[in-house]
Amino acid sequence: MPSMDHENALRAQGHRRIAGIDEAGRGPLAGPVSAAAVVLPVKYSHPLLNDSKKLSEKQRETLYDEITNDGSIQWHCVFIDAEEIDRINILRATHLGMERAALGLKKKPDAVLIDGRPVRGFPLPQLALVGGDGLSFSIAAASIIAKVTRDRWMLEMAAQYPEYGFERHKGYGTKLHLAALRRHGPCPIHRQTFSPVAQMELDL
């Protein structure tokens, strides 16, 4: 279960404001990658908060509302859209999103906890934690915000492009999505450099 142990370790080193950072949507064939940064109160705890992938959609939605409506919590979420992903590649886009999320907080953090591996050139002191969304409350909160924000946007896109079934797969490469791609070809929010989207473009 997540805790504040890693946040407290950074505070023991002299850092005061610690932000947890996570992303959602690195793997889909369509839509943006979403990145969020969250600063929690020093003694924060929550009985249900965990890695967003371990929670139901209803639990994520409830936690999202709790976190974003709590005046003691600071957060910021950004999208890097499909066009920019295609231009700079998904890894660089993810890192750029993490940087923009952290620097977009009302008060710049002193250090960050990042889910995954270290980000080269990150503009703030960082501690990278593989599986961090299951270890740190701050990262877990960021994972919830990034995931729910992106999912809600994909539901909006489902209404705009109903033929793809985005409301069901959120842009991931499911059988339903691949069948729709074969039938209709890519739409403007598809990542043109991702296989099989790129191959389908060649075949059109």
Image (cartoon, grey):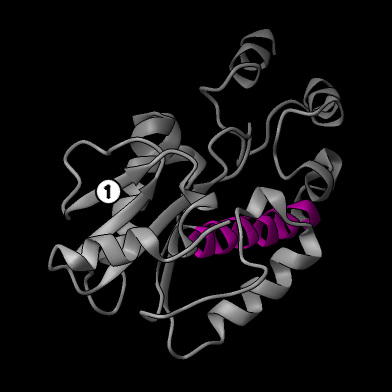
Which of 133/10 is in front?
10
Query: What residue is shown with label 1?
Result: 127
Q: Position of residue 87 (x, y in %)?
A: 37, 31
Name the residue at 30% across, 62% down.
Answer: 102
Q: Position of residue 122 (x, y in %)?
A: 20, 46
Left/right placement of residue 109 relative to residue 60 reads: left
Secondary structure type for disc 1 = strand
Name the residue at 79% across, 24% down.
Answer: 178
- Magenta-colored stretch includes residue 150: yes
Which of 70/49 is in front?
49
Considering every residue shown, the one lying at the far top of the view is 203
- Magenta-colored stretch includes residue 101: no
Q: Is residue 34 visible?
A: no
Q: Position of residue 90 (x, y in %)?
A: 43, 32
Q: Quadrant of residue 60?
A: bottom right
Which of 193/171 is in front?
171
Q: Is residue 39 visible?
A: yes
Q: Quadrant of the C terminus?
A: top right
Segment colored magenta: 140-159
Left/right placement of residue 174 relative to residue 47 reads: right
Name the residue at 51% across, 40% down.
Answer: 82
Left/right placement of residue 18 relative to residue 84 reads: left
Name the residue at 56% across, 78% down.
Answer: 67
Relative to 2, say whether 184 is above or below.
Answer: above
Q: Amino acid at mark 1?
A: Leu
How dense is the environment of label 1, judged by Cα within 10 Å: few (below 14), some, or many (20 and up)?
some
Q: Quadrant of the N terminus?
A: bottom right
| Magenta-drawn stretch, dominant element (helix, strand or loop) | helix
Number of marks in picture = 1
